[in-house]
Amino acid sequence: MKAAIVRDFEHAPTCGEIEAPQARDGEVLVRVAGAAISQLVRAQASGKHYSSGKTLPMVPGADGVGRLADGSRVYFAFPRAPIGAMAECSAVAAGQCVALPDDIDDVTAAAIANPGMSSWAALELRAGFRPGESVLVNGAAGSSGRLAIQIARHLGASRVIATARKPQVESELRALGADDFICLDQPGERLVAAFRERLHGAGVEVVLDYLWGQPAACIIDAAAGHGGSRAQPRVRFVNIGSLAGASLPIAAGTLRSSGLELTGSGLGSVSHAALVGIVGKLLRAVGPARLTIDAIGVPLRDVESAWRMAADGKRIVLRP
């Protein structure tokens, strides 16, 4: 069968032939209709993600959409290595498939699942989010961040604050449901002051962080108190990505003097079954919540060029 194949972690996958998988006990075969090129998939295919496989050749793709032998349409995740979702056929545990609603097309479903799941899982499973709380989305300009705004609203956030480096995206993020905007492209002291105003003013219960690095450090610094008689407000900070840096220093006094609670959301902190369950909720909400994502389908044979495409911010879905 045809598949996108990684033969070297330093190079993009190429389209080639590989032996089709056979279903084992408890598995089903999915005839793949679409698999998105996400940040997770890129990192895994480069060997740089903590969940990356180390055996080559391998087929990338953490999730996708397709049809089972009986013709039913499904979303599936975590196909059995080394053959991921970017192939004509994948073998996956039966419990890691959920039905696709009829009102969502294959490209949209494949594109929206991973970025939408990232914020929904972080809010529901890691932050213990409750309707009426306020949410700060740090790094809201990308596909995941834009969906995080929409999903926070859908789940009942009373107020959503978005951050991004480019001030020109503010109107777009507000149109998606953001009430407030903080531009990250400013000196550190001013950025800390802007975060402090929101955290200690109207208040922020949950932070969804897609960036880590310097922007996250500014939020953490802003949460610090001064050892007063009153406890600082509780802030549940959930890291989801590290686009601005993989590490940062944290002063011990910051944690002792604040209501900050640091946690993360991703593979390993949430079970595969729970993540697939969250995607099921997400896909059922696409229509009622009018969730949107900018996505295009690209033939699997063009995987090399698709891997290099920025596509003007669009999510690229490979289609066998």
Image: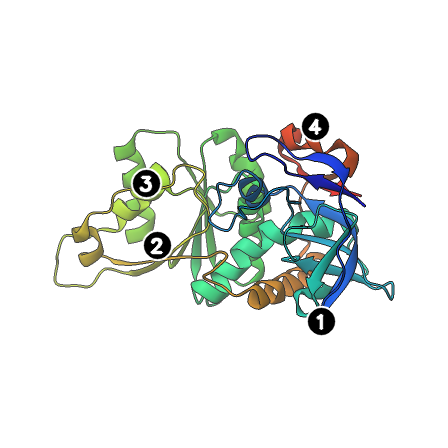
Q: Nearer the viewer, mark 2 or mark 4?
A: 4
* Image location (x, y in percent) of residue 195: 32, 44
* Image location (x, y in percent) of residue 246: 38, 41
Upstream in the sequence, badge 3 or badge 1? 1
The residue carrying mark 1 is 25
Determine the CA span between mark 1 and mark 2: 54 Å
**Residue under the point 26% across and 51% down:** 223
Q: Nearer the viewer, mark 1 or mark 2?
A: 1
Determine the CA span between mark 4 and mark 1: 37 Å
Q: Secondary structure at mark 4?
A: helix
Q: Give the vertical position of 95 relative to 134 (above or below).
A: below
**Type of amino acid at the residue the image marks with label 1:** Asp
Upstream in the sequence, badge 4 or badge 3? 3
**Residue under the point 62% across and 57% down:** 78
The residue carrying mark 3 is 194
In which quadrant of the rendered image does the C terminus lie?
top right
**Type of amino acid at the residue the image marks with label 2:** Ala
Seen in the image, is 200 located left or right of residue 287? left
Q: Which of the 4 quarters of the picture holds residue 90? A: bottom right
The residue carrying mark 2 is 202
* Image location (x, y in percent) of residue 252: 18, 52
Which numbered disc covers residue 33? none
